[in-house]
Image (cartoon, rainbow, N blue to C red):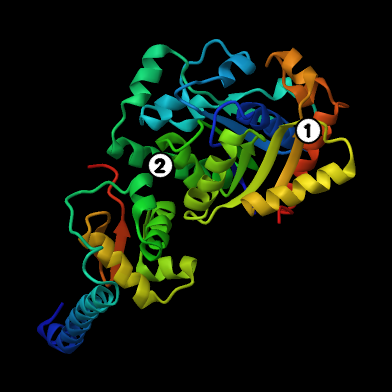
């Protein structure tokens, strides 16, 4: 069963953070105990979306071995409905912290991998979290590959953009396959996916081009652009089609139905 | 413990030592067999090479599987690794020892068991 879910992509701007936040919030709405992690240390963004201006400890501190993970995770359950709980572990957005994280050596990255892997024991086994959702940085970077190695399931966000297709395909073959990771592809910002025949055609195309199962098809919604990242969309717009799509994606992962 | 006790335990002690030595001999033979099977070129001894994700990516598939299992477990015997990879214990023992020679893993004996781990602290 997939308990640690990493959201990754080849290129930036594919909607990883939007998907991570809303997937985590959807799991929580389904009554699960969830922790969302900002592993994009080069461009931290969850602190802004979740409106957390100050934190005593950041995820950087945990990976640096300066504190326990429980000092980092913060309870945001008040921000969501339902019976579940949403927690978050945020990356330090200060320029100094970004610079420091960019200059880590291979030994540090190996230790960071060990610390990420140990979250399975501390959070899933001991503290009974149901899901950990990793928002990662795009492409082949240490922090994102560490997240992929740790994860049980990788949500690959992509768009129809030509520059994204080849890279995503290569990454599927040369990264996720080598680590034997279960993957599901989310085709984001799709134009005009209204008819069933269009959706079926996209599904076939994804299977042909990427040779992985499709987790979801997300149309280009103006309302999401208008929200400007100021809200947890699935929480604020419970009846919006985007919320229903995320609901379906979360259910597929929960029921292990991504084939 | 009396003199008689010691002398009665001696044959048992000697047998235990013989068994330990045979196990070590067996491990060495497994490594030699693996070296012959895959050729020596992929086994380059290194000093304290970090077992990071880029190293994992560059490894041959059969070693990556073993190394990934140790990364996940933290510390494990060949038997424990074989339970997760569904490969024979002797095969895992050979791969683990290769990874030790390559400098990616450390090995520690506790009684009759040999534990393998990635040294993240040094």
* For residue A43, side relative to residue B11 (left or right): right
Q: Are marks 1 and 2 on the same chain?
A: yes
Where in the figure is residue A84, as x and y percent of width and height?
74, 33
Q: Going 36% across and 31% down the picture, which residue do you hit?
A: A65
Q: Residue at x 76, y 26 (%)?
A: A220
Classify the position of the N terminus of chain A by image quarter.
bottom right
Residue A44 image point, x, y percent: 51, 21
Image point (26%, 66%), residue name: B97
The quarter of the displayed image where residue A79 is located: top right
Q: Secondary structure at mark 1?
A: loop
Q: Position of residue A21 (x, y in %)?
A: 66, 28
Q: Nearer the viewer, residue B24 or B101?
A: B101
Q: How many marks?
A: 2
Q: Is residue A98 visible?
A: yes
Whether residue A211 sits left or right of residue B13 in the image: it is right
Q: The residue marked by circle 2 belongs to what chain?
A: A
Asked if one can make out residue A8 in the rendered structure from this viewpoint, the answer is no
> Which residue position is annotated with label 2?
A113
Chain letter for mark 1: A
- In this rendering, the answer to whether A258 lies above or below B20 is above
User: Tag 1: Cα neighbours inside 10 Å, few (<14), some, or many (≥20)?
Assistant: few
**Looking at the rendering, in which quadrant would you find the C terminus of chain A?**
bottom right
Disc nearer the start of the sequence (1/2): 1
Residue A207 in the image, given as x and y percentages of width and height? 69, 53
Marks 1 and 2, how far apart at CA = 32 Å
As drawn, the residue found furthest toward the top would be: A53
- Residue A83 badge: 1
| Image quadrant where residue A198 sits | top right
Q: Is residue A246 above or below residue B82?
A: above
């Amino acid at each position: 069963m997939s308990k640690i879910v990493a959201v990754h992509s080849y290129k930036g701007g594919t909607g990883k953070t939007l998907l991570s936040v809303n997937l985590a919030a959807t799991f929580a709405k389904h009554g699960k105990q969830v922790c969302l992690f900002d592993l994009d240390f080069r461009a931290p963004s969850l602190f802004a979306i979740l409106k957390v201006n100050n934190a005593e400890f950041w995820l950087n501190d945990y990976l640096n071995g300066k504190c326990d993970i429980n000092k980092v995770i913060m309870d945001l359950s008040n921000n969501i409905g339902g019976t579940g709980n949403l927690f978050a572990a945020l990356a330090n957005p200060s320029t100094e912290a970004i610079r420091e994280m960019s200059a880590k050596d291979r030994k540090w990255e190996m230790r960071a991998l060990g610390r990420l892997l140990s979250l399975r024991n501390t959070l899933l086994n001991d503290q009974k979290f149901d899901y950990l959702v990793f928002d990662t940085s795009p492409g082949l970077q240490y922090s994102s590959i560490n997240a992929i190695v740790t994860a049980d399931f990788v949500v690959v966000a992509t768009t129809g953009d030509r520059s994204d297709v080849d890279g995503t395909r290569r990454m599927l073959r040369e990264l996720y396959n080598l680590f034997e990771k279960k993957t599901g592809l989310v085709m984001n910002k799709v134009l005009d996916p209204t008819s069933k025949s269009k959706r079926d055609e996209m599904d076939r195309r994804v299977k042909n081009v990427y040779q992985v199962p499709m987790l979801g098809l997300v149309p280009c919604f103006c309302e999401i652009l208008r929200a400007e990242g100021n809200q947890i969309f699935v929480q604020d717009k419970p009846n919006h089609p985007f919320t229903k799509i995320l609901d379906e994606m979360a259910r597929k992962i929960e029921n292990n139905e991504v084939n | 413990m009396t003199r008689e006790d010691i002398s009665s335990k001696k044959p048992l002690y000697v047998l235990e030592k013989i068994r330990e030595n045979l196990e070590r001999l067996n491990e060495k033979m497994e490594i030699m067999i693996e070296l012959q099977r895959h050729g020596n070129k992929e086994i380059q001894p290194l000093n304290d090479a970090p077992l990071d994700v880029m190293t994992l990516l560059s490894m041959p598939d059969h070693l990556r599987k073993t190394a990934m299992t140790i990364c996940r477990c933290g510390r494990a015997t060949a038997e424990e690794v074989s339970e997760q990879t569904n490969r024979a214990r002797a095969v895992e023992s050979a791969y683990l020892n290769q990874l030790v020679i390559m400098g990616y893993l450390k090995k520690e004996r506790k009684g009759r068991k040999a534990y393998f781990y990635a040294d993240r602290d040094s």
